[in-house]
């Protein structure tokens, strides 16, 4: 039974925060009993990745360290510098990655976050939510993904052996 969900995110312009907030609002309707902890990557510790029953990672794609197609700086610092040896112990998880079509590696953060989940032994619940360009007119896509995430959570066995 999933009772708590941690969403670790970071945002430069507010785009990722808008997507995360839209997901949280949708989940409040479909899964009103789940307590959601929304927290910034910059204040997150590696152990926060596994402190709830489920996890969502969310960020934009940036040119971190002057390389295009990277995770945004604070998420890079958390996942690629501070939490490199974390075992996610089968935690049910999903990712949200944003980007802009003007860049060659469009929204590659989504792929990088998915890779982090699989390398670190999370249970990936569904394909990444990829948001290309401004998210503000993409509410329907975000809500549909939240519904799928919610339905995947409800199909999990009552007791998860991590
Ligand atoms: C310095 C910088 C570098 C970026 N590099 C990429 C990139 O390599 N690929 C991409 O798809 N988008 C890139 N973007 C676009 C952002 O990922 C996109 O605007 C996203 O919505 C930002 O979300 P956020 O403000 O929540 O971090 C870049 C944006 C900036 C400002």
Image (tube, helix red, strand yellow):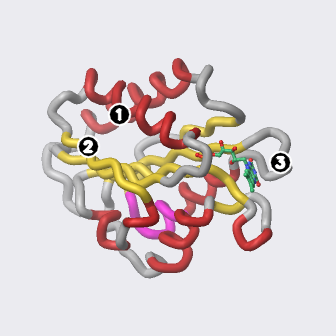
Q: Is residue 120 above or below residue 106?
A: below
Query: Residue 2: x percent and y percent?
Result: 19, 44
Quadrant assignment for the C terminus: bottom left
- Which residue is at the front of the view, 8 or 162? 8
At a point 30% along the width and 72% down the height, the residue shown is 47
Q: What element does badge 3 sit on?
A: loop
Separation of marks 3 and 2 at Cα, in angstroms: 32 Å
Separation of marks 2 and 1 at Cα, in angstroms: 8 Å
Q: Which residue matches tag 3?
A: 103
Query: Residue 21: x percent and y percent?
Result: 41, 34
Give the left or right position of residue 162, taking residue 18 as reference. left
Disc assigned to residue 36: 2
Residue 98 painted magenta: no
**Disc 2 + disc 1, Cβ < 8 Å:** yes
Q: Is mark 3 within 8 Å of ligand 1?
A: yes
Q: What element does badge 2 sit on?
A: strand
Q: Which residue matches tag 1?
A: 24
Tell me the crowding category of disc 2: few under 14, some 14 to 19, or many 20 or more residues within 10 angstroms, Cα based. Answer: some
Residue 136 seen in render: yes
Q: Which residues are magenta?
A: 116-122
Give the left or right position of residue 28, taking residue 26 as reference. left
Tell me the crowding category of disc 3: few under 14, some 14 to 19, or many 20 or more residues within 10 angstroms, Cα based. Answer: some
**Disc 1 + disc 3, Cβ < 8 Å:** no
At a point 73% along the width and 73% down the height, the residue shown is 65
Q: Quadrant of residue 43?
A: bottom left
Q: Is residue 118 above or below residue 1?
A: below
């Amino acid at each position: 039974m999933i009772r708590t969900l941690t969403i670790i995110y970071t945002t430069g312009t507010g785009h990722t925060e808008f997507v995360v907030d839209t997901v949280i609002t949708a989940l409040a309707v479909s899964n009103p009993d789940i307590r959601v902890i929304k927290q910034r990557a910059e204040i997150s510790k590696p152990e926060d990745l596994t402190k709830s029953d489920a996890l969502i990672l969310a960020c934009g794609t940036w040119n971190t360290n002057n390389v295009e197609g990277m995770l945004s700086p604070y998420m890079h610092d958390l996942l690629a510098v501070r939490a490199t040896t974390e075992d996610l112990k089968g935690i049910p998880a999903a990712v949200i990655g944003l980007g802009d079509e003007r860049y060659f590696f469009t929204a590659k953060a989504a792929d990088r976050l998915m890779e982090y989940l699989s390398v670190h032994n999370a249970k990936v619940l569904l394909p990444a939510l990829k948001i290309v360009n401004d998210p503000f007119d993409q509410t329907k896509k975000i809500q549909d993904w939240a519904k799928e995430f919610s339905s995947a959570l409800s199909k999990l066995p009552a007791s998860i052996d991590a």
